[in-house]
Each structure stands twice: as C-alpha cells, then as structure tokens.
Amino acid sequence: MEEAKNLSSKLQEGIDALIDELQKLRDENQALRQQIVLLKAENEAKNSEISSLYDEIGIKERELENVLSKIQNVLGR
C-alpha cells in the first residue's frame, strides 16, 4: 500500500511539473506572439518611411534635373 502511495505521489508530482512547464511554454508563446505583432507594426512603419524617402528622392531628382536644364540653357546662350 505504501508503494502505491509513493508511486501515486511521484506520478502526481510529475504531472504537476508537466502542467507547470506547459503553462510556462504557453506564456512564452503568447509573449512571442505579442512581440511578433509589435515587430510587424514597426516593420510596416519603417516600410512606409522608406517609401516616403524614395518619393522625396524622386522629387529631389526632378528638381535637380530642372536646375541642370536651366544651367545648360544659360550656358548655351
């Protein structure tokens, strides 16, 4: 009878340890999911910023082409 109680106690301890580990892993998984959501939002913001910078570069390039054209016109006169 004593052996059965010891075995039952050991099994219960093992089960409790597994349940604790499972909960720990679930918590870690949830934290990682939240981090992924945050990183995706940051990535989207960076992509938007990069797109805006490319647009700005395009505008500056057109402005430079206009200035160059004016300089060429003045020099060509």
Image (tube, helix red, strand yellow):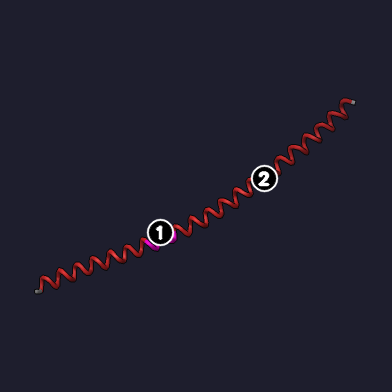
In this rendering, would 38 be left or right of 28? right
Q: Quadrant of residue 65?
A: top right
Q: Which residues are magenta?
A: 26-31
User: Badge 2 local density, few (<14 within 10 Å), some, or many (20+)?
Assistant: few
Relative vertical location of residue 38 with respect to residue 2 in this rendering, above or below:
above
- Amino acid, disc 1: Asn
Q: Which residue is mark 1?
A: 29
Q: Which residue is mark 2?
A: 53
- Name the residue at 56% across, 51% down: 43
Quarter of the picture holding the N terminus:
bottom left
**Is 29 one of the magenta-colored residues?**
yes
Secondary structure that dominates the magenta span:
helix
**Is 22 one of the magenta-colored residues?**
no
**Circles 2 and 1 in contact, beta carbons < 8 Å:** no
- Name the residue at 52% across, 57% down: 38
- SS at badge 1: helix
Q: Position of residue 51 (x, y in %)?
A: 64, 45
Which residue appears farthest toward the right when viewing the image? 77
- Amino acid, disc 2: Leu
Q: Position of residue 62 (x, y in %)?
A: 76, 37
